[in-house]
Image: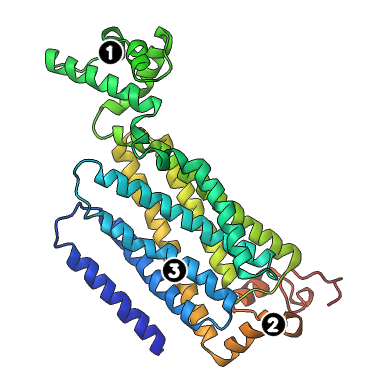
Amino acid sequence: MKTFKKIFLVWMGLVGLAILSLLLPHKEAGLVNHVNTLIQMLLFVTSVYLVRVEPTKKNKFIFLNLSLLFGFSLVFHIYNFVPDTGYARLFFFQYAIIGYYFILAFAISYISIDLIFREWKTISKYLLTAGTVALAALYYFYPFVADSLHIYRTDDAVHFSILQETFTNHMSETGEVPSVGELVSQLSLSEVAKSSGVQPLTVEESTAITARLYPYLFDNNYVILFVRPIYLSIMYISVLSIGFILLFFAYQYLKDPPQGAYIEKIMFLLLIYCTMEALHAWSYVKSVEWYSFYEIMNLGQVISIGVLLLIGVFFMLRLRFITSPNGEFYEQEIATSPAGITRWRDMFDELMISHFLTRKHTLGRLFVDRNRVT
């Protein structure tokens, strides 16, 4: 109980600092975003305490990686105070996003690699994880790393800039909103695109592009168009994380290796969380109207907050278990001599067995091979 009280006090201290910081000039992020940040701060504090009290070295690194992930909540809170001058907010946003999803994929893939290659040294696991995730991140995020203004140099961005200028000029001269046909008749996307380094277009292609980009000329819809390439990369990295989680459960099902208490439950919740992140990114890529997307995003974030709260619950349950004499003994035994100890089942395992499985076929373990000789 003393540890939980410390966690709560540290978290409340961070919450207090976050609230006080809002007295400074900042850009409002919305209540849902603030709640999400505060919940991740709680997970950050809890995971740091898990690193401190973990009885086995290998599990310390699992929660160290997760603490780095949830520690990014502090970075996103700082984002609210970045001045809206020049490209400062853009640079901060895109590199913070890249860092967050890199750490997300890294933390998840490390758990899978640690399970599959449990006899490897920690440094080897880290090298394999870093190499795998870095290659994927480099493939998807390289344009943004190589060129900090990449979002302004895509074909859609260049074409939109041409359309926006023509659209604004027409509005100033006539006071009326131009149609797609009027825009096409007043500009030459082919010539301007050629001077901008973009592939020249035919009249038919210009008309098709104008019709496709036309909705983004209204309200704040252009934000979706410009930032879409980043979210497309986020979607792919989230899918990579989902793949590693599925690999974790496939190996768990086939081999039934020893695993720390509640680790598989945390991985299941991370599966839901990554799925929501992929859906958020996909909805962004497919959206046209900014305000409609913002409402959908807020609803999705509410679900993500619920998942994060459940992750926090399992963090607390693991913390309570490993700080007990039985839990400390169990964790050390499965790390040193797993064949000599009976698999521990938590309340959720018992619930599954009692409601969905026949107890006489369980033989003390979930999904065990009945014919296997131990």
Helix, strand or loop status at disc 1: helix
Across and down, in percent, residue 225 comes to: 35, 32
Looking at the image, can residue 242 be seen?
Answer: no
Q: Regarding mark 3 in the picture, which secondary structure is present there?
A: helix
Q: Amino acid at mark 3?
A: Ser
Q: Which mark is residue 336?
A: 2
Q: 299 or 81: which is nearer to us?
A: 81
Task: State the residue at coordinates (83%, 71%).
Answer: 370
The C terminus appears in which quarter of the rendering?
A: bottom right
Rendering quarter of residue 158: top left
Name above or below for residue 314 compared with residue 175: below
- Residue pushed farthest bottom? 325
- The mark closer to the camera, 2 or 1, is 2
Residue 80: image x %, image y %? Answer: 24, 54
Picture residue at 42% right of the left edge, 49% below the top: 98
Dot 3, how many residues are within 10 Å of its Cα: few (below 14), some (14-19), or many (20+)?
many
Q: Nearer the viewer, residue 135 or 17?
A: 135
In what element is the residue under mark 2?
Answer: helix
Q: Residue at x 36, y 35 (%)?
A: 151
Q: Which percent across, then down, holds residue 235? A: 48, 44
Residue 183, disc: 1
Q: Residue at x 25, y 46 (%)?
A: 88
User: What's the mark number on residue 67?
Assistant: 3
